[in-house]
Image (cartoon, rainbow, N blue to C red):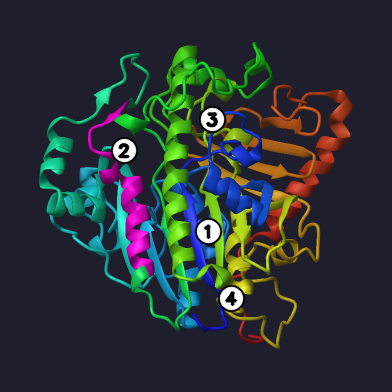
Amino acid sequence: MSQSQPNFLVICTDQMRADHLGCAGNPVIQTPHLDALAESGSHFQRAYVNCPLCMPSRATMFTGLTPRGHGVRTNGIPLSRELPTLTAALKGAGYHTASIGKLHFSNYWLNDDVKEQVKLEDFLEVRAFWEEGKVSDIPTPYYGFDHVDITLGHGSYTGGHYANWLKEQHPEAWKKLQTEGVNPSPSGAEQSGTFPLDESLHHTAYVANQTIDHLDKLEDDQPFFLFCSFPDPHHPYELPENWEHKYSPDEVVPPIAREGEFDDLAPFFKDIFANDLQLSGRGKATDIPYEHKLELIARTYAMVSLLDKYIGRVIQALDAKGLRDNTVIVFMSDHGDMLGDHGLLNKGPFHFEGLLHIPMIWSWKNHVKKQETRALMSLLDFAPTVLELAGVPVPEGPASAEAPMQPPAWAGRSQVPVLTGSADKVQDAILVENDEDYLGLRLRTLITPRYKLTTYTGHRGLEPYGELFDLEHDPHELHNLWHSADHGSLKAELFEALLSKIIETDSAVPRRLSHA
């Protein structure tokens, strides 16, 4: 391509931890293609989400706003079609924008009473609407995307264009998926089993192959933003038969836990097991046998290695078309997974590293510095970084002449100075927000280079409580310093910094246009 603006290939996984990469120091998992990508660019070792749930995180990626700002404060809330998006800004600047795979900008399911009340065009990702024939395609532009090829759900519970492709191109396989389903793991480990179709028909292969096909159809002189979004390694823990035993439960890195650690944490942590609570991030939680936790980790490792194989194919296709030199490649995930750490699984109202800390790699030949950086980055920074690299202004425009010092339209910070090596960092703290409607909780967390402060409010009328961890001396977050008298002044300082960060990241849109 001869255009001056860079292309963007953004590869996103779902529910993947930062430590599930070989280049991140995991001694077991094999991720050769992602390791090579990290070696070719900047590997952010302190990248975090701003909310540990799918829908809020993805809304933040594409709006540049906090959950407070875009309104998707938890799962189950569709993203407003009225908000400016990263992709709409790129499209307006001449980019072709395409998404292959998972988006999750609207709900996957609705209760029957709600289904009858909503506008169909606002809920195009509801799986039942596709099954009922009410939706068979995504009209574009869709949140700024020119082209959408969507997957819905996870594992064998799937829908969207991927399901349509199976029905039309592989009807016998689709019938087998519907009639036979998944063969459960002999151990009885939850949500685990054999994906009943050949690897070539798995959704990971589908997303990669559709991405490669789309690369082949691109115009030579138009820059592109291509979002290649895989539904894995999100649970259920289903794998093609030839991948099921790639890793033994005996060889995985065991989950982190300390006996009695819940005594120092908020009371609902014990309630999760004692009362089988429903949470936003998973169904009712139960005490999971230790050997099952190890199996789930082994299965997740295999899901990641399968992803790595197909991500490698996508990058190789980019190389084969001669596009690599002028393409920014980004690899990231929308959040992590507890995977047995602290006795917990999947996600919910807990802000531990396993859930908040995500992989983040940026590569652009001759432009992005080859480095491992500990600069703090969050998904809030993704959109402004892309736009600066593309030379496209943030939507809503600059501050007006009437009020040139009004706050930036987007709360995130462009990481271009870190990517180019002109700065070691662009910020000193990250804000994480999480509303847990099932428990009536609101969590707010401040992450600094050394400390993490989390405060919970609203739980059954009790006084606020929280956590304070020294990540430098306690990286596994096993010793809560919240009640430590020796850390009282530090806690007060971090509370003040948390309040400042909340105010700093408040929405500044719509913009002021005149004095009055």
Question: Which amino acid, by three-letter code, is at mark 1?
Answer: Met
Q: Earlier in the sequence, mark 4 or mark 3?
A: 3
Of 194 and 492, the residue lying toward us = 194
Question: In 3D space, how far apart are the residues under numbered discs 1 and 3 (Cα atoms)?
Answer: 22 Å
Of 476 and 408, the residue lying toward us = 476
Question: Residue at the spot x=47%, y=47% of the render?
Answer: 13
Residue found farthest to the front: 320
Question: In 3D space, how far apart are the residues under numbered discs 4 and 1 (Cα atoms)?
Answer: 16 Å
**Residue 338, disc:** 3
Q: Would you place residue 254 above or below residue 71 in this image?
A: above
Q: Judging from the image, what secondary structure is the residue with disc 3 in? A: loop
| Residue 49 visible in this rendered orientation of the protein | no
Question: Residue at the spot x=63%, y=66% of the render?
Answer: 365
Q: Earlier in the sequence, mark 1 or mark 3?
A: 1
Q: Would you place residue 288 above or below residue 112 in this image?
A: above
**Residue 61, disc:** 1
Q: Is residue 240 left or right of residue 441?
A: left
Residue 99: % across, % down? 38, 63
Q: Earlier in the sequence, mark 4 or mark 1?
A: 1
Q: How many marks?
A: 4
Of 289 and 443, the residue lying toward us = 289
Say which residue label 2 marks.
Answer: 155
Question: Which amino acid, by three-letter code, is at mark 4?
Answer: Ala
Would you say the residues marked 4 and 3 are in contact, meaning their CB atoms lie under 8 Å apart? no
Question: Which amino acid, by three-letter code, is at mark 3?
Answer: Met
* Range covered by the magenta-colored residues: 193-215
Q: Earlier in the sequence, mark 2 or mark 4?
A: 2
Say which residue label 4 marks.
Answer: 390
